[in-house]
Image (cartoon, rainbow, N blue to C red):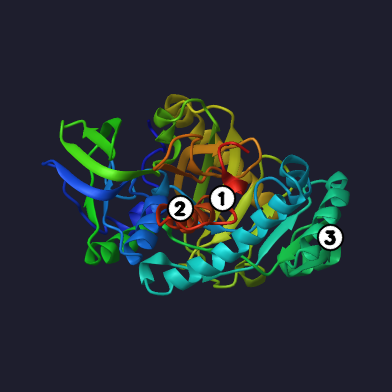
Amino acid sequence: MDLRTNYPFWLLEKGILGSYPSLEADISTDVVIIGAGVSGALIAWQLCRAGVKCVMVDRRHVGMGSTAATTGLLQYEIDTPLAALIEKVGYMHACESYLLCSAAIDELEEISGQFSDAGFSRHPSFQYSSFKKDVRALKKEYALRRSIGMDMTWLDRKEINHLYGFDKEAGILSKQGAVINAYGLTHSLLHECEKMGLKVYDHTAIDTIRRQKKGFQLITAGRHRIHARKVVIACGYESGAWLPKRIDKLSTTYAIVSEPLQKTSIWHRNSLIWETAQPYLYLRTTADHRIMIGGKDDEFSSSYKRERALPQKVKELEKSFAQLFPNTRWKTDFRWAGLFAGTKDGLPYIGNLPRQRNLYFALGFGGNGVVFSQIAAVLLRDQIMGKKNDHAAIFGFDR
């Protein structure tokens, strides 16, 4: 599956941070992780630190799928607003989902503090009402989030204009938010996991997974065999090959990055900015004083259509930026498009399929992909170690 157009910003900024061999022999291990992106890396980090013998495989180079294309926004807000999520999954599960996302940002900060290439940086998150009609629902959202302990401020039109310089009716400024370089974090984690015994093989595609009496036999495209007690599938949008039915809806999203700007503070505390419209426009800054803007999603997954649409989408994103910040000069330096997947409720799928013991999935579909990956890493560590995790039902396949 073609997950993205070529040359996203993170790949060109960091280059190749690590190289790994392909598998050339039959091997045995406790756990096989399929997928060497940020999800697989965070899972490996948790398992290796718990003393579990692991092997990781990927059909590409490490971090070269969707991880290289992610925009790296870390938000506790899920694509489904809290009020709507309560209607879908119930009050307790909805609120716990939001709180778990908030806690995951703190956990990612602790992990990333060990690695300079992770590029973790704290920023508030600002969501504005795209239209006047959205204000009432946003006000309800503000009250709900405040009621579960989220630290935030309601901004009116005058305050938005003062802090951001554009004209919008109202918005929510949340204290909890951050950015990360998922590609850099992935390589950093795997370098450390190798010291703890992790074996990483890229350019190693898995053709077949066979259940046996004592675990699984995985057969690679090169006809080598991996024997393992347990299997974790963390290969994102390509995980559908191992699922009995489709659980996600694929679309295409677009992003552009500006040339570096002279000023270091571009708007209020270089907040993450996004809106109430669906699909939403989002903006963030980078460590070298660039601006990233993304969105303008299309409801198709064709790589051919994606390539043809990208030039026009670049113009649309540039126009959207100019409408918000007419006095800030913009010149596009990087542009790319990638697959984006959503679920019926905006939550990830984590854990076993019904009656499928020891075969686990970490499917962090949605705009909170890296945050969901951290939740999955902790939850799957507990399940693989035989420990109860009270949050497992929230993200289960039978919800």
Rendered image quadrant of residue 223: top left
Q: Secondary structure at mark 1?
A: helix
Give the residue pinned by disc 3. 143
* Dot 3 or dot 2, earlier in sequence: 3
Distance of label 3 from label 2 (alpha carbons): 35 Å
For the residue pair 3 and 341, the one nearer the viewer reads as 341
**Which amino acid, mark 2?**
Gln
Distance of label 1 from label 2 (alpha carbons): 9 Å
Rendered image quadrant of residue 218: top left
**Which amino acid, mark 1?**
Ala
Rendered image quadrant of residue 46: bottom left
Q: Position of residue 29 (x, y in %)?
A: 23, 49
Q: Secondary structure at mark 2?
A: helix
Binning the other alpha carbons within 10 Å of mark 1 as few (below 14), some (14 to 19) or many (20 upward) gives some
Binning the other alpha carbons within 10 Å of mark 2 as few (below 14), some (14 to 19) or many (20 upward) gives some
Q: Which residue lies most toward the front here?
A: 213
Q: Position of residue 116 (x, y in %)?
A: 37, 72
Vertical order, 263 against 156 (above or below): below
* Dot 1 or dot 2, earlier in sequence: 2
Give the residue pinned by disc 2. 383
- Res 328 seen here: no
**Which amino acid, mark 3?**
Ala
Q: Is residue 112 left or right of residue 222?
A: right
Distance of label 1 from label 3 (alpha carbons): 27 Å
Q: Tell me the number on the disc at residue 83.
A: none
Residue, x 57% and y 59% (percent of image)? Answer: 284
Give the residue pinned by disc 1. 392
Residue, x 70% and y 40% (percent of image)? Answer: 278
